[in-house]
Image (spheres, rainbow, N blue to C red):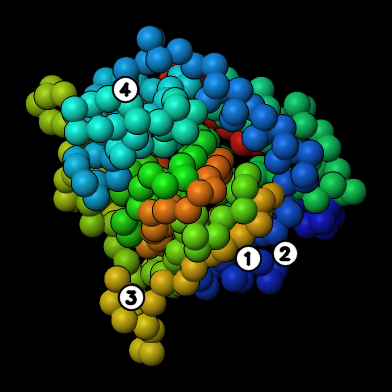
Amino acid sequence: MSTPAQTGGLTPSQLESFERDGYLVIPDALSPATVAALLAETHLLLDNFPLSSHPMTKFSTGEKSDHVGDDYFLSSGDKVRFFFEEDAFSPDGALLKPKARAINKIGHYLHALSPPFAALLDPALNPGSVAAERRESHPGAIARALGFKDPRCLQSMVICKQPEIGGAVPPHQDSTFLYTDPPSAVGFWYALEDATAENGCLSFLPGSHKWAPVRQRFVRAAGGKPGTEFIDNAGPQFPVGEEYGKAKQDGAKGGEDEGYVMGEVKAGSLILIHGNLLHKSERNTSQKGRIIYTFHVIEGEGTTYDERNWLQPPAEGFTKLFRD
C-alpha cells in the first residue's frame, strides 16, 4: 500500500487535525517551480485581458454592497472572467488603478481552461505531483483521504487581495455558496505569495464546522428575476456524521465573532477548509499583494446539487478528481 508521502494523501495526524479544527495547513504543498508557474500564468492573465470586452463587474463580499449577481458573474462557471475590487473605482465610476492592480479575482473555470492550473488536478498533465520525490500533495489523493467517493471540482479562482484596496471578507462558510444536500464542500486554498497579517491572511474559528449550521444559501434570484439572493436553508445544515450538529463545547472561546486564529502561511502552502467552518480575512492595507489560488470540491456521489445554486455545472458536468 502506498504511503501518504508517495501519494500526496494525508497522514493520520493531519487527518485528525482537520477533523478536530475544520482546517489544515500543509506547508510546501507546491514546489517553488509550480508556484512560479502559477504566478506567471496569473500575471499573464491580468496583463492581457482587454478592458473593452470585459464589463467592470465589481466583486462584493457583502461588506459595502450586495453580493455580485449580474449575468457576467452567473455565467462564469465555464469561463475565465475578471472581477474588480470595489475600491478600485472613484465615486463616479472611474478606474483608479492599473487593471492588473484593480482585479479582486479571476474565475471560475481556471481548473479546466488554464493549462498551468489544470495541471494541478490531472496527473497526466503533472505526473511529478504524485511522485515520491516531489513535495506536492495531489488533490485527488487528499480528497480520497478525506473520504470522498466521487470528488468534483466545481469552481476555481485566483484571488489577488490587491495592495491598499484588497477588501475584507466577513465570517462565512463555503457551503453557504456551494451547497449540496447534505453539505460536502471542502476548499483547497494555495498561497502563491506569503499571506500575512499585514496583507490580509485568512483567520479561522477552530472547531466551528462541528457546531455552526449552514443556515443560509446563496442562490439565483427566484421567479426568473436577475441577480442572486440569500435564502433560508431548508435542507440539511451539517454533513452526515454524529460528530456534527452538537452544542459548542464548554471552554470554547466566545461566540461566532470571537476566538479566531490567524493563518499566516508561506507561498506554496495549502490550507484545506471544511465547508461548515467559519473563516474570514481582513482588508489589505499594505503595499504588498496576496495572490492565492483556490478551488472547491464537492461530493458527487449520494448528494444533490440543485438548480437554485448560483453556480451551475457546465455541459460536461463538474470536473472529476479521480481519473483512474
Which residue appears at 66% of the width and 51% of the height? Answer: 267
Residues 196 and 185: in front is 196
How far is the residue under mark 3 from the one under mark 1? 25 Å
102 lies left or right of 19: left
Looking at the image, which residue sits at the far top? 52
Mark nearer the N terminus (4 vs 3): 4
Quarter where residue 72 is shown: top left
Element type at mark 2: loop
Element type at mark 1: helix
- The answer for how far apart the CA atoms under marks 2 and 3 are is 30 Å
Neighbour tally class for label 3: few under 14, some 14-19, many 20 plus, Cα within 10 Å: few
Amino acid on which the number 1 mark rests in the picture: Leu
Cβ–Cβ under 8 Å for marks 2 and 1? yes
- In the drawing, does residue 238 fall left or right of residue 148? left
The Cα atoms of the two marked residues, 2 and 4, are separated by: 44 Å
Q: Nearer the viewer, mark 1 or mark 4?
A: 4
In the rendered image, the vertical position of residue 179 relative to residue 251, given as above or below: above
Disc nearest the viewer among 3 and 1: 3
Asked if disc 1 and disc 4 are in contact, CB closer than 8 Å, the reply is no
**Residue 214, image quadrant:** bottom left
- Which residue carries the number 1 mark? 15
Q: Quadrant of residue 245?
A: bottom left
- The residue drawn where x is 41% and y is 36% is 104
- Report the residue marked by disc 2: 11
Sooner in the amino-acid sequence: mark 2 or mark 3 = 2
Spatial separation of the CA atoms under disc 2 and disc 1: 6 Å
